[in-house]
Image (cartoon, coloured by chain):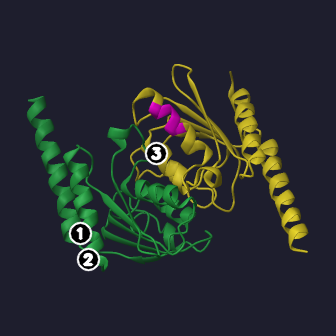
Chain colours: A green, B yellow
């Protein structure tokens, strides 16, 4: 499967997050041997501030392989990772990160910080951005527009 | 209990990490009502790159309270948080962070990044640094010195 195929999977996971009332972000970790591990954003549902899509996919992959490192793995995620997720990506030694939409408010790959290309840290994954960015961003916009309208309706 | 008392608790947790062969870092989350939740660094043992001391203490507190936010809580940790942990601290809306030793290699509070005072993010906790810094740092130095000696001995 190519980058588009994996990002389509990540988008489906993002839709699952939205259906649960969570900010729609989805992620897939693909190991060097082709094994896949998925995650969707679920901090509210799981009572866990660290339960972002990419954290959950990485933790699932690590639990299954019995290794806290995922050297050679590729992480697909619909939204630019935040500082938390970028830090975990470095800790896990993810080989390549592919993301969809930029996150100008909290992104830590290109937007606010450039954690994944920081030569002071001990790992720099390859990064591909903008894969299916319009679809990934549109899903987020729809979610926030709907939430604003709902909140307005319930406070009137 | 005051800052020194909680940091002493965090130091004992760091020693537990060291006894398990993990980098010695310990953390305590204290909620506004005084409830305490602890964590020690355990990524290798738990096969989880996100299992830093402060992440584990925050997750335990969130699981117990059924809330992904810890508004008004204080986080004590023996070492300056990294980008991952600093990001999670912002997500969890921790009220105050107290840490011991600076981490010039990966610290994201004062050393490499200043995530917790970044006004572009939507939360800035109060920060107190340097509490029992010498004891916190000495424990780390002893751990790394011992590990280097052990590696040298086993490769000769």
Instruction: Indicate the chain on which mark 2 is placed.
Output: A
- Tag 1 near tag 2, CB within 8 Å: yes
Residue at which label 1 appears: A8
Confirm whether circles 3 and 1 share one chain. Answer: no
Identify the secondary structure beneath mark 2.
helix
Magenta residues, start to end: B58-63
Packing grade of label 1 (10 A; few <14, some 14-19, many >=20) is many
Decide whether the magenta segment is chiefly helix, strand or loop. helix
Work out which quarter of the rendered image holds the N terminus of chain A and state it. Answer: bottom left
Whether residue A73 is situated above or below residue A59 in the rendered picture = below
Q: Which mark is residue A4?
A: 2
| Mark 3 and mark 2: Cα distance apart in space | 32 Å
- Left/right placement of residue A50 relative to residue B23 reads left
Confirm whether circles 3 and 2 share one chain. Answer: no
Packing grade of label 3 (10 A; few <14, some 14-19, many >=20) is many
Residue at which label 3 appears: B90
Residue A144 part of the magenta-drawn span: no
| Mark 1 and mark 2: Cα distance apart in space | 6 Å
- Compare residues B39 and B79 and report the one nearer the observer: B39
| Mark 3 and mark 1: Cα distance apart in space | 30 Å
């Amino acid at each position: 499967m190519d980058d588009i195929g994996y990002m389509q999977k990540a988008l489906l996971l993002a839709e699952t997050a939205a259906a649960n009332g969570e900010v729609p972000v989805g992620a897939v970790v693909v190991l060097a041997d082709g094994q896949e591990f998925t995650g969707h954003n679920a901090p509210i549902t799981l009572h866990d501030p660290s339960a972002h899509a990419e954290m959950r996919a990485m933790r699932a992959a690590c639990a299954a392989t019995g290794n806290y490192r995922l050297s050679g793995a590729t992480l697909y995620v619909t939204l630019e990772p935040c500082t938390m997720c970028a830090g975990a990506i470095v800790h896990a030694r993810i080989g390549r990160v592919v993301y969809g939409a930029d996150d100008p408010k909290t992104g830590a790959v290109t937007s606010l910080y450039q954690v994944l290309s920081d030569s002071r840290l001990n790992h720099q994954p390859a990064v591909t951005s903008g894969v299916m960015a319009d679809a990934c961003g549109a899903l987020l916009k729809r979610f926030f527009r709907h939430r604003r309208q709902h909140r307005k309706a319930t406070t009137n």
